[in-house]
Amino acid sequence: MADMQTPLRKVRGLGAAGHGTAEFWRNRVTSVALIPLSIFAVWLVVSGLGSSFAETRATLSHPVVAILLALFILISLDHMRLGMVEIIADYIHSEGQKLVLLMLNIFFTILVGGACVFALLKIAFGG
Amino acid sequence: MSNSTATRPGMKPRPLSPHLQIYRFTPTMAMSIVHRITGVALYGGTLLVAWWLIAAATSQSAFATAAAVMGSWFGLLVLFGFTWALFHHMLGGLRHLVWDTGRGLEKHTATTYSLATLAGSILLTILTWIVILFAGA
């Protein structure tokens, strides 16, 4: 059957991952947010090295630390999920494998995010 | 895909665009590849962050185990690599944000940015670990 789609129609909202430029923009927004948040995370880890269990929990339960660390983790996960979608689109050409890997990518990031946020909240609320 | 001009039946195979083995190796190419590799490494590295946080949320002994593994020579090596991957990916990302504005795309400027990304990431990693080794622990 002849292909009646115009090039614009093919491109609009599609591309290898199926979402047009939405992912490009989201990647940029998250990358800008991650610059200060990553510097904060490195500073937090470096300044807290060698701390005891109780000291570490006291630091992590401070609202500012807990909020910024949660943001660092969640935005990192969103950013890396997008990056992995790009890698999968680049290297995986079988449609079935691609769907499986795109799903695993989502499951992995949600699992890691859920675990980290639960741990942070448990520490913050003194559990 | 089977209807593309490269594979349509009955047609002579179309020339494919040259790939890695054809192009001369350049700093921009190398840093692009390293940007992707560090991205994948950081992806896996989130498991370490999750482990550390869950250990801190679980018990004193779980935290001691995590701290002991991360404080071993192998753990420190992984953390050193983690630090470098983070700084390299961050500087590489900054370079991409500059390029997104249409600036710095001239060949020699782009090469300079790429080399600066590498040099900057190594410098920041070493500085961070000097702080860790002499002030922190």
Image (cartoon, coloured by chain):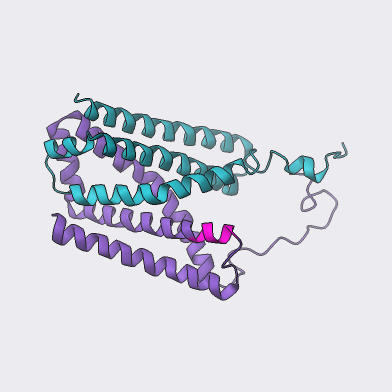
Residue range of the region highlighted in magenta in the rendering: B95-101
- Residue at 26% across / 64% down in the picture? B127
In the rendered structure, the colour chosen for chain A is cyan
- Residue at 46% across / 39% down in the picture? A78
Above or below A18: residue B109: below
The answer to whether residue A117 is visible is yes
- Magenta highlight on residue B96: yes
Above or below A5: residue B4: below
Lateral position of residue A71 relative to residue B32, left or right: left
At which x and y percent is residue B85? Answer: 37, 56
The answer to whether residue B26 is visible is no
- Please identify the quadrant where the C terminus of chain A is shown: top left
At which x and y percent is residue A58? Answer: 16, 35
In the rendered structure, the colour chosen for chain B is purple
- A21 and B22: which is toward the camera: A21
Above or below A87: residue A120: above
Lateral position of residue A37 relative to residue A123, left or right: right
- Residue at 28% across / 32% down in the picture? A120
